[in-house]
Amino acid sequence: MTPTELFAQIQQKRSFLCVGLDTDIDRIPQHLLTEEDPVFEFNRQIIDATLPYAIAYKPNLAFYEALGAKGLTSLQRTLDYLPADVLTIADAKRGDIGNTAERYAKAFFETMNFDAVTVTPYMGRDAITPFLSRPGKWAFALALTSNAGAADFQYHTDGGEKLYERVLKRSAAWGESAPGELGFVVGATRAEALQEVRALAPKAFFLVPGVGAQGGDLEAVCRMGKNEMGGLLINSSRGIIYAGSGKDFAKAAGDAAFALQSQMAGYIG
């Protein structure tokens, strides 16, 4: 998917919404456990209920890998079910180099057919470029995260420049000549830094987790983070997929997604 195609989805649905499929077998409604594939059935109903409002879906690999081969089957079935006009993001945070990075890129982009994958840039350029070698495929590099431990390293200052600022500047330059698309992960609970981050990467798309259950300020994210192409994928996971726990869980998820999309619409020209 190209940035132009993604922007068309933003305009059509008047939405920046990315639904995080962090599907925990211990949290899905009990009545689904009798299904042959409870995780996929949960995801299928969530997708059906939220698709009118979402432009992207982001399965978190940990929840599927924890179930072994069965979980990976559920993941692949979920990917196959998702329509081609939404962006699919593997929340995998891969960050190795050399042949290992090349194989990770092959796994996510060719074998599983994800559109995008989250990557960690702290091993340098050769940890990122294998994921930028395919036109229409995306890498979202961790830039400024929302966890408390982000303060351990990301705000470290050397010569007046914070570490996350250096990561953004250097990795943005790597993406300029690549056939693939490079975006950045910027936590919603760091909304006060979004204007600064946007100044460092004016054209990039930001994947913004932390809205909803983690307390991120949706209004601040939309106002400070958007650019002329929209430039945002605002993720909500638990706040949508676990909005309900009974037989009407999918309706509750759809209602939660609609509520977020309705707020986002006011910031989309």
Image (cartoon, grey):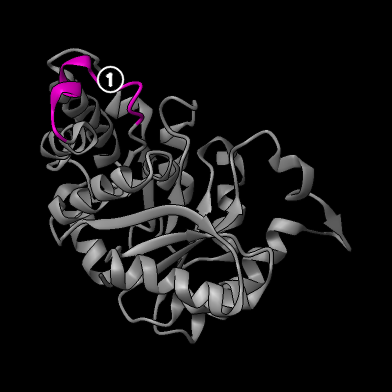
Q: Is residue 29 on the magenta stretch?
A: yes
Q: Which residue appears at 28% of the width and 28% of the height? A: 241
In the rendered image, which quarter contains the N terminus? Answer: bottom left
Left or right: 240 in relation to 185 = left
Q: Which residue appears at 78% of the width and 42% of the height? A: 152
Residue 2 screen position, x and y as percent: 28, 72
Residue 5 screen position, x and y as percent: 21, 68
Q: Amino acid at mark 1?
A: Ala
Q: Is residue 163 on the magenta stretch?
A: no
Left or right: 256 in relation to 235 = left
Q: Which residue is mark 1?
A: 243
The region drawn magenta spans 24-36
Q: Which residue appears at 38% of the width and 58% of the height? A: 231
Crowding around mark 1 (Cα neighbors within 10 Å: few <14, some 14 to 19, many 20+) is some
Residue 18 visible in this rendered orientation of the protein = no
Identity of the residue furthest to the top in this view? 246
Q: Secondary structure at mark 1?
A: loop
In this rendering, the answer to whether 103 lies above or below 112 is: below
Q: Which residue appears at 23% of the width and 18% of the height? A: 29
